[in-house]
Image (cartoon, rainbow, N blue to C red):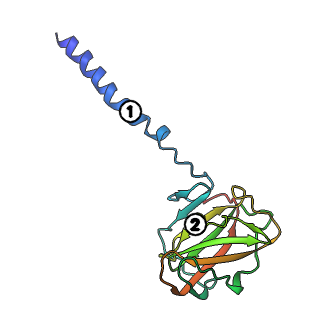
């Protein structure tokens, strides 16, 4: 009787532990290994990361002024030459207000002509949005123009925007 109880206890313990050992396998969220730990997936090919420590260097912030209400597009002159370098795996976007963003080159629109397809960024300048350049077939070595519109029917004033490149580095 004692042996039966022990065997039953072992079987029940294994039955309870096995699902927890599979959590790592089931938790594959499609985030590339070369992005920082803590990155979350926003959509296919778009990732967001908020660092644990505030960045001290804000020298690359650009005040693009007012981003008009949703549906009205502005093309900030300070971002008319965003080049995807040959070694660039990601473009990183940081923005202080809630906007939608797009990149255009000639007649090529990276996120399409439907504003709902443009990624929503902002509300926390410390959050970084990673745009996977290969996923969106961005051409390397050419200039893109940034387009912006508000996420809401209200204009966003004094928008701070930063767009920069990042490539796969070890030790992240």
Image position of 45 with respect to 79: above or below: above
Q: Which image quadrant for residue 21?
A: top left
Q: Find the residue positioned furthest to the left.
A: 1
Secondary structure under badge 1?
helix
Q: Which mark is residue 119?
A: 2
Q: Residue 155, relative to residue 138: is it above or below?
A: below
Q: In the visual, does 40 lie left or right of 146? A: left
Percent x, y of residue 50 = 50, 67
Which residue is disc 1 drawn over? 19
- Tell me which numbered mark, 1 or 2, is placed earlier along the sequence: 1
Badge 1 crowding class, 10 Å Cα cut-off, few under 14, some 14 to 19, many 20 or more, is few
The one of 7 and 119 positioned closer to us in this rendering: 119
Residue at the (43%, 39%) spot, across then down = 23
Residue 81: give x, y in percent of width and height: 76, 79
Q: Residue at x 59, y 63 (%)?
A: 117
Q: Secondary structure at mark 2?
A: loop
Residue occupying image coordinates x 66% and y 77%: 147
Taking 17 as reference, is 146 left or right? right
The N terminus: image quadrant: top left
């Amino acid at each position: 009787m004692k042996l039966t109880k022990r065997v039953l206890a072992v079987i029940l313990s294994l039955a309870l532990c096995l699902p927890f050992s599979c959590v790592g396998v089931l938790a594959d969220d499609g985030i590339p290994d070369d992005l920082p730990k803590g990155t979350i997936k926003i959509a296919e090919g778009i990732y967001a990361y908020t660092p644990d420590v505030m960045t001290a260097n804000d020298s690359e912030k650009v005040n693009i002024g007012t981003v008009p209400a949703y549906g009205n597009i502005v093309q900030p002159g300070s971002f008319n030459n965003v080049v995807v370098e040959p070694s660039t795996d990601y473009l990183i976007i940081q923005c202080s207000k809630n906007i939608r963003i797009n990149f255009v080159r000639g007649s090529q629109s990276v996120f399409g002509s439907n504003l709902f397809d443009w990624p929503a960024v902002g509300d926390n300048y410390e959050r970084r949005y990673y745009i996977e350049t290969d996923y969106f077939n961005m051409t390397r070595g050419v200039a893109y123009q940034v387009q912006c519109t508000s996420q809401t029917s209200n204009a966003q004033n004094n928008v701070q925007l930063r767009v920069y490149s990042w490539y796969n580095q070890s030790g992240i």
